[in-house]
Image (cartoon, rainbow, N blue to C red):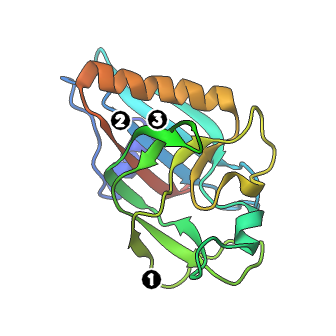
Amino acid sequence: MLPPVLAHMKQLGHKIFDNPKYDYDLNIYGIRNRTGTPNTFDDTLGVLYLWDGNWRGHYWNGTVDPGAYYLEHPMNVKGTAVMACGQYRGAYEIGTHRGKRALVQTGPVSVFRDYNRDKTIDRQGQPESGLFACNLHRAGKASKFVNRWSAGCQVWAEEKDFEEFLDICYKQVKLTGFKTFTYTLMDQWW
């Protein structure tokens, strides 16, 4: 039986990595909090994978939305990137973000552009797809507010949590030989 997160992912039509031949073939996901408060780490970032025929999972506090600083000061003239829900197959690889270990975007993702320079996150209009450096990385040791930690990235609130996640990613590479990672972003459904 699939864990509830993967059952929902499957219901949305996304690929589930559940081949018992591959331990540590990761299902990496983000869940956007329905009643989210801007500039807080109130979303869920997680991973589920098979190990010896059984599901294992981990989840952590993070953000899937940009921080207040970049909402008010976009890096792009079209506005700040807000990742659209969807599955981004093989779009990430292990690399560095600002000199620290991260999963870096190497394939296209879709983003909305929030251009009105307020602290409210807007996801309106047609998303655009491309390479925007929407990486998966950590904030500080134990960050309370997003602020400058995200301009469209998916960010773990605590360094130790992200390091645990990244160790799992390294295990995928070691055990399966798969060097790319799929990320699935969903809105909260419960």
Measured in 3D between alpha carbons, the distance from the residue under mark 3 to the one under mark 1, in whole angstroms, is 28 Å
Measured in 3D between alpha carbons, the distance from the residue under mark 2 to the one under mark 3, in whole angstroms, is 13 Å
Quarter-wise, where is residue 122 in the image?
bottom right
Q: Is residue 117 left or right of residue 4?
A: right
| Marking on residue 126 | 1
Q: Amino acid at mark 2?
A: Leu
Q: Position of residue 139 (x, y in %)?
A: 69, 42
Q: In the figure, 72 relative to 67: above or below? A: below
Residue carrying label 3:
47
| Marking on residue 2 | 2
Along the line of sight, the residue nearer the viewer: 187 or 26: 26
Q: Secondary structure at mark 3?
A: strand
Q: Which mark lies nearer to you, 2 or 3?
A: 3
Residue displayed at 77% across by 78% down:
118
Q: Which mark lies nearer to you, 3 or 1?
A: 1
Rate crowding at label 1 as few (under 14), some (14 to 19) or many (20 or more) other CA atoms within 10 Å.
few
Q: Is residue 92 left or right of residue 41?
A: left
The quarter of the rendered structure image containing the N terminus is top left
Q: Position of residue 56 (x, y in %)?
A: 43, 24
Residue displayed at 58% across by 39% down:
99
Q: Position of residue 42 (x, y in %)?
A: 71, 50
Q: Amino acid at mark 1?
A: Gln
Q: Is residue 143 left or right of residue 124?
A: right
Q: Position of residue 75 (x, y in %)?
A: 63, 70
Rate crowding at label 3 as few (under 14), some (14 to 19) or many (20 or more) other CA atoms within 10 Å.
many
